[in-house]
Amino acid sequence: MVLKPLSDRVVIRMIEAEDTTKSGIILAGSAKEKPQVAEVVAVGPGEIVDGSLVPMNVKVGDRVITSKYSGTEVKVDGEELVIVKQGDILAIVE
């Protein structure tokens, strides 16, 4: 199944946080924070404002930082993805 986001929506795949700290301490599952870095999987066409199409600032393959706990989680073909609005993306990681 292929997801094609509408309007200013973006489909992202969360990138898991490290299991160990810099000093080598292994973190338990409950001690890890929810990841905020993600990879863009699909991008909608953009939002129409006052009759004009506002272009998207991200593209497929970009690594981005999102707001904590934003978006809608979906499972597609066994893979967990998140659908967020472009406004929930805070930065592109270069």
Image (cartoon, helix red, strand yellow):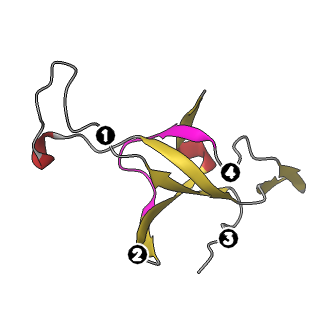
Q: Are marks 4 and 2 in contact (CB under 8 Å)?
A: no
Give the extent of the magenta segment. 62-72
Q: Are marks 4 and 3 in contact (CB under 8 Å)?
A: no
Q: CA distance from mark 2 to mark 1?
A: 20 Å
Residue under the image location 46 percent in, 63 percent down: 81
In the rendered structure, which amino acid carries the disc numbered 2? Gly
Residue under the image location 14 percent in, 48 percent down: 29
Is 8 colored magenta in this rendering?
Answer: no
How would you rate the neighbour count of disc 1 (Cα within 10 Å): few for under 14, some for 14-19, many for 20 or more?
Answer: few
Please tell me which of labels 4 and 3 falls first in the chain: 3
Query: Of helix, strand and loop, which one carries label 1?
Result: loop
Q: Which residue is mark 4?
A: 60
How would you rate the neighbour count of disc 2 (Cα within 10 Å): few for under 14, some for 14-19, many for 20 or more?
Answer: few
Q: Which residue is mark 1?
A: 17
Q: CA distance from mark 1 to mark 3?
A: 27 Å
Please tell me which of labels 1 and 3 falls first in the chain: 3
Farthest residue in the front direction? 24
Q: Which residue is mark 2?
A: 78
Dot in front, 2 or 3: 2
In the image, taking residue 37 as reference, residue 51 lies left or right, namely right
Residue 41 sits in quarter: bottom right
Q: CA distance from mark 2 to mark 3?
A: 17 Å
Where residue 3 appears, x then y in whole percent? 62, 72
In the image, taking residue 61 as reference, residue 49 lies left or right, namely right
Please tell me which of labels 2 and 1 falls first in the chain: 1
Residue under the image location 90 percent in, 57 percent down: 51
Q: CA distance from mark 4 to mark 1?
A: 21 Å
